[in-house]
Structures are given as C-alpha cells and as structure tokens.
Image (cartoon, rainbow, N blue to C red):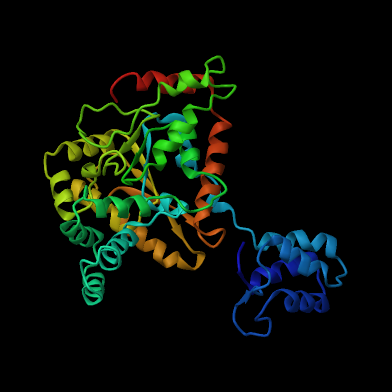
Amino acid sequence: MRKTIFKKELLFVFDSKKVDRLDQEKIEIALFSNYLSGAPYYILKESILDLPCLEKALNEITLKQKTNLIPDLSDLFVVSDDLNIPPFIKKLFTEHDKVVFFVGAGVSKLYGLPLWRELSDAAIKHLHEKAQLINNFERSTIVRSFQDPKQKLSIFHDFLPKTSPGSLDFYKSILNPSGQIKTNPYDLLVQFQRPIFTSNIDNLLFEAIKNKLKRPTKEENSDVQPGKIAETIQNPIYSGFNEEIQIKSGVPYQIHGNFNSDPNSTILTIEDYLAAYKSGSGLSKFLQNLFNNHRVIFIGYSLEEFEILEYLFGKKDSINKHYALIPIFLNEINLLSVYKRYLERLNIEVVPYYLDFNGYERLIDLLQKWLDSINEIRTESHFEKIAFLESGVL
C-alpha cells in the first residue's frame, strides 16, 4: 500500500462524501504523522503497515458516516495498475506465437541468491576471509577500484580456477537458496508455457520445470503417470549454442552456463565474455537469431546487464520490439524516464512495476495477475498451435 498521498486526493474524498471539518481533522490526526505540516502530501504513521491497520485506526475514531467512508479512504492507499497486463503484452501472448522470457539475477534474488554485483563482492570477500589469499587492504582496494562485476570475478578466478576446491565451495555456498517466499516465480513463469532463457548460473529454473512436468493436472495428460512424464524432462542447455538449436518450452536455456552441471561452462570473467560474445561466435549468432525472430520479455535485469544486447545489436538493430519489466518506487518516475530513453535505443519498451508494495515480491503478484488474465482467454486450439510450432525449428 502507499505510504504517502497528496492532500488533494484526500480532499477529493472528503468533498465527494461531504465530510465535515471536525471529522476531517479526526481522520488526519489518526492516520498521518505530518497532519500539521504545510507539505502538499500526507505521510502515514509508521504504525499503519497495511490496509487492516488503516481500517483499524479509522474504526477507533468516532465518525458520522464511517461505513460509507472507510472503503473510499482505503482505496486511496491501494495501487494495482502496475499489476494489470498491458494490452500490447496480452496481445503478444494471444496472437504472437514466438514469445520468450529472459530471466536475470533479480528473480533468483527472491530466493536469497545474490545479484551479480553482490556475487562479485562476495567473491573478493571470500578471497580475503576464507581463502586468505589477499589481505584486507587489497580486498577493500579491489572492491572500491573495480565497479564491473566481471572484473572482480576475473580477479577471483585468477586466484581460484572454477574447478578448484576453493571456488567450488564458494559457489556451492552462495548459490544455495536461502529465501522464504510465498510463491515460486519460476513456477509461475513455467506456467506461461513459453521458452525461458536465463543468464543465471543456478539450478532454480531447471528445478521449476522439472517440478512442473512431474505434476500432471486434470487438464494436462491426466491419464499419464507422473513417472512417465518425468522421463520427458530435458536437462538444461548451457553450452554449445548455435543457430540450429531448437527453441521450445520445457527446456531451460542457460546462456551463461550452469555451475552445478559444469563450472567451466559459466560465463563470469572478462575472458569468458570476450570469447562467448565475439563476432561470429555460436552464442552471438544464437542470440541474434533469437531476438530477430522472437519477442522477448526481460525480467530481473538491471540496466548494466543490457550491455550485452548493445554489444550484439548496436542501436535498434533488432527487428522486433522487446519488453523489460523494471522495478521502481513511485517517487522514481524521473528515473523511469532514464530507463526508457536508454532501452529505447535497443528497441526495448519498459513495463514498470512498483516496489512500494511488498518490495521485490511485487513481481510475483504481477506474474500471477498476468497468468490469470492470459488463462482466461486461452483455448485448446491455442495450445495445439504452440505444440505444432515447437515441433519444428523456430
């Protein structure tokens, strides 16, 4: 829920409900910490954490028309427009067959896994505290002097090669999910039944796909035993990318490798990136083909992580328009315009959602709302069409 509202918003409700001045003052004193301030907005008291708290505070004061007023006041603090699927996205899922998801570290972050910058900082800390290969001055100098995560991970792997015991222990520890969330975002993504690509090196996407295929529903192969469905599960594709690889749902595509399966497959260091994305490489051709022939929805990526696309395509060289879910706070509208201007150069349209409500778990609410909306209009023929298209090379 919102923590601030403009005074004019509250005044509109008061005027529409014909609330007298005495009741207005009671409400302002009960709800807001700055009710005497000359600012154009009100700030909710810290004790009012959610809508039940808000309604409790209103019920504790005597008002002439409490019954009709409380719902309208509560609505002032609810924002849900960011959860609604934009019409152009909904049209993609219902009319455009080649739609894929690209998932970044921001999604795995919900499980307690680190973002790329956090991973690289933790790696340098590991060199100092666990491996004891650098001193504290060297650690602080590296963290302060090198901003690019690839630089710090290059330093880390200069000391500890990817398959060394020290490196394996580090990644085993840091890629271990520790977060507690109400709904698995990867489970939701799998239910969209679209191909999913990720630059993450963890196993979370594969586990979600595996769990989905092991759980047949009444609508999906109810006459097939779970054990038999499990036989169709395909391992992640995390290396050997080229233009000939078939793109279909139910297969985890890990373009930067999978550390659990093969530490040497991971793309982490500057040397790794230069080799993987050099002109004419299998991965660069694969991605160029993907972005030119599919509509991509990016989830969990920061601005700095889109640099690979800039390297691959330059400015608006991709034939198709793509989309990026970008988390912001409501008071960061100016920052949103910066995101839009930057990503427009890559033919990517920004779709914002608000962190003010439930933090980064707002993404889970958004995906569930999108999925519900799409499922309402899906038909059996739609799924048959998807299956037919996936039977060939897309």
Task: Quadrant for residue 96, please give it.
Answer: top left
x, y percent for residue 261 = 29, 38
Q: Which is more toward the observer, 213 or 393?
A: 213
Q: Quadrant of the C terminus?
A: top left
Q: Quadrant of the N terminus?
A: bottom right
x, y percent for residue 157 = 19, 56
**Residue found at x 45% / y 66%:** 332
Farthest residue in the left direction?
279
Using residue 75 as the reference point, say whether residue 56 is left or right of it.
right
Farthest residue in the top direction?
223
Task: Quadrant for residue 252, please give it.
Answer: top left
**Residue found at x 59% / y 53%:** 80
Using residue 269 as the reference point, say whether residue 182 is left or right of it.
right
**Residue found at x 23% / y 77%:** 137
Q: Does any portion of residue 345 appear in the rendered image?
A: no
Using residue 288 as the reference point, say whether residue 30 is left or right of it.
right
Q: Is residue 233 above or below residue 256?
A: above
Q: Does any portion of residue 188 appear in the rendered image?
A: yes
Using residue 21 as the reference point, say whether residue 110 is left or right of it.
left
Q: Which is more toward the observer, 13 or 102?
A: 102
x, y percent for residue 212 = 49, 31
* Label tally: 0
